[in-house]
Amino acid sequence: MATQQAWARWMVALAATALLAASGLSSEPVAPAPITKAKAPAVATPADGAVPAWAKVGQLQIDSVRKVGVPVAKEINLGGGVTMKMALIPAGKFMMGSPDTEYGHEGNEGPQHEVTISKPFYMGVTEVTQAQYQAIMATNPSKFRGATNPVENVFWNDATEFCKKLSEKTRQAVRLPTEAEWEYACRAGTATASSFADANSALGDYLGDYAWHGANSGGKTQPVAQKKSNAWGLYDMYGNVSEWCADWYGAYPKGAVTDSQGPASGTDRVVRGSAWNNYPDYSRSAYRDFYSPDVRNYYFGFRVVLSVSAPGL
């Protein structure tokens, strides 16, 4: 009986094997396919260098944020529907000042010296506008009214008070740029007289594309960001209004410096950039001026910078 049962089981197995062979299937056991989860769509993070549509930043800026893991550009809410756009300025080195041979060179622009900017920082892509100033200071001292025109007619102390109040509002370290930071950001990686002109003779040919100055300003300030930006997405670094910087004014050092803060004391503050009433030869990256901090007029304004907070900085 047992022999017959074994014979029957053998015949069933043989039939099954024949059926599998006829269908092209294998009789070997098949391991179940592994279960894989669908990949979530890639989301741009600050370290990926995601760029807002309004920002005109360059590859160096994008590469820089991939290293430190912060946004390449950001927009600060000032309240009342008013914002402030800022672009990241990467760390780096540059030659500050101008050579004696540069067209328009003035004696206080030398000696040229190497400056290291050791940490990245954010800078306002435009000069502080009247709408932005009004949102923080609840007043508008400007002569040439226009919400998107740069605020002017401000003391140095007015500019620093704006920075203080904006810092308190946003809980971020907002301040005026140092003179070195301003020139470094203005140059945007260039070593020529202006960031848009390779030769002194070409400055006048290009200036109207980049700046509001004496010949095209209509005798007043104009809305910000109407001209072309430099390579790091900053507008009106030449023309419109001259800009207060944090430093006391003084002679340049003769050697290389890192994160220059200017003299420890003085009587005048540095003003950088040309204004709506200046000649073309003022529209150079190295051009510098100085005024008492309690002077105000309708061609002085300012822009702000924001310290970068990131691991390792």
Image (cartoon, rainbow, N blue to C red):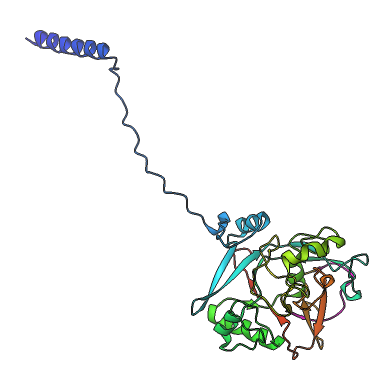
What residue is at 85 percent from the left and 59 percent from the top?
A: 199
- Magenta stretch: includes residue 71: no
Q: Closer to the camera, 135 or 74?
A: 135
Q: Would you say 175 lies left or right of 253 here?
A: left
Image quarter in which the C terminus is found: bottom right
What residue is at 58 percent from the left and 76 percent from the top?
A: 172
Chief SS of the magenta region: loop
Q: Where 118 falls versus 158 (above or below)? A: above
Residue 143 appears in the figure: yes
Q: Which residues are magenta?
A: 245-257
Q: Closer to the camera, 216 or 67?
A: 216
Q: How many marks?
A: 0
Residue 151, percent from left and from top: 65, 82
What residue is at 80 percent from the left and 62 percent from the top?
A: 205
Residue 14, percent from left and from top: 20, 10
* Residue most extreme to the bottom: 294
Residue 147, percent from left and from top: 58, 79
